[in-house]
Image (cartoon, rainbow, N blue to C red):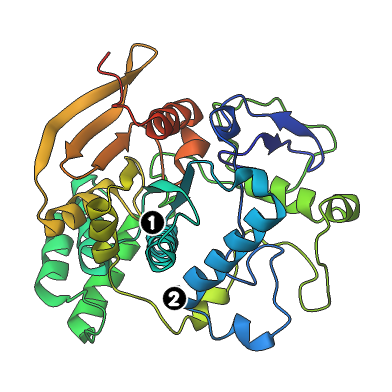
Amino acid sequence: MQELGPFRVGSDGKTLYKNQYAWNHVANVLFLESPAGVGFSYSNTTSDFVKGGDRKTAADNYIFLLNWLERFPEYKNRDFYIAGESYAGHYVPQLAHNIVYHNKKANKTIINLKGILIGNAVINQETDSIGMIDYWASHALTSLESSRKIHKYCNFSLDAQRSDECNSALDEAGNMVGDIDIYNIYYPLCFDGNVTSIPKRFSIMEIDPCSGYYVYSYFNLPEVQEAIHANVTKLHYDWQPCSDVLEEWEDRQSTVLPFLKELMEKEIRVWIFSGDTDGRVPVTSTQYSLEVMNITTLNSWRAWYRDREVGGYVQEYIDNLTFVTVRGAGHEVPSYRPDRALSLVSYFVAGIPLPKK
């Protein structure tokens, strides 16, 4: 409702507007709320909400896909792609790994996976963290001195214990950043989350910073919950934009780079994109993570275009890996640059390079 879907919600929390840049213009789109407990998704087993993890989520998602394809068999032989952003940098490659594994085990194509697309993605903890600190310093959010302290005192590997000096340096940097939307460092904040009696003037190209409140209101309308057959219970009585399920995550892998390499070796298309105004999982994080993979460049860094303007930059590697930036987009790329996001997914699905002009 705020990114790539066919509708956006107006400021009254009731009115819907069509999104002309929705991704269903170029593909059949299936949205999956995952892991169990996110959105309206649920489980009849309470422990599922407190004993989640990467592997369990991938297994659950694979079973869901099998069941869905049995319910709608006309899609069984279609080309299949998986897309996601942020921590879906874990969900997407891990689900793809399960698909490849079971196809091989069955010696047949159960799910016709052709590619994955992940944006501003968490893929390698150590380089993701260092890349974030370097982005902050290079974009004047923190001082160079603060950045140097973090580099000196902090070890960001998964099992490392943070020293007092590291924690102090991180706190100092965080205080320097101030009250901004770290997911889009140049975008305004929401100062009034109340819905309005009459929807405000609306533009798909200029997302309202308070739109999350409008979506919250919309999904909690009884008539909407009834229409979408939401499982509303005492445990799960309303829809929330964020979930605390991951707070109890028992299995959090430090890197998914081996999964990406596996997919590349299996000739699965891998595109990684990055909105360049995100300060949380920024472009530098992804660049550093790709460097760790030690892969060979096929076509060097260049601009790509939409409507005669630079849409961002792209670098292509051997073995089906492409890295793309989206100019002027934050963490949620289709929110801030829906036009460029639609171009991106169009060329991804088509399997052709982004335009040079």
Q: Residue at x 17, y 55 (%)?
A: 288
Query: From this viewpoint, is residue 136 visible?
Result: no
What x and y, as percent, mark residue 339? 48, 25
For label 1, the SS is: loop
- 99 to the left or right of 259: right
What x and y, as percent, mark residue 272? 32, 46
For label 2, the SS is: helix
In the rendered image, the vertical position of residue 108 relative to residue 319, given as above or below: below
What x and y, as percent, mark residue 336? 48, 35
In the rendered image, the vertical position of residue 113 relative to residue 339, given as above or below: below
Tell which circle, 2 or 1, labels the residue nearer the N-terminal end.
Answer: 2
Q: Nearer the viewer, mark 2 or mark 1?
A: 2
Within-10-Å neighbours for mark 2: few <14, some 14–19, many 20+: some
Q: Residue at x 76, y 73 (%)?
A: 236
Q: Amino acid at mark 2?
A: Arg
Residue closer to the observer: 223 or 215: 223
Give the number of marks. 2
Q: Amino acid at mark 1?
A: Gly
Q: Residue at x 31, y 40 (%)?
A: 276
In the rendered structure, are the residues bearing label 2 and label 1 in contact, judged by CB atoms less than 8 Å apart? no
Residue found at the very far front of the displayed protein: 107
Residue 178: assigned label: 1
What x and y, as percent, mark residue 267? 27, 47
Asked where in the image residue 314 lies, by quadrant, the reply is top left
Within-10-Å neighbours for mark 1: few <14, some 14–19, many 20+: few
- 45 to the left or right of 351: right
Query: From this viewpoint, is residue 253 visible?
Result: yes
- Badge 2 is on which residue? 55
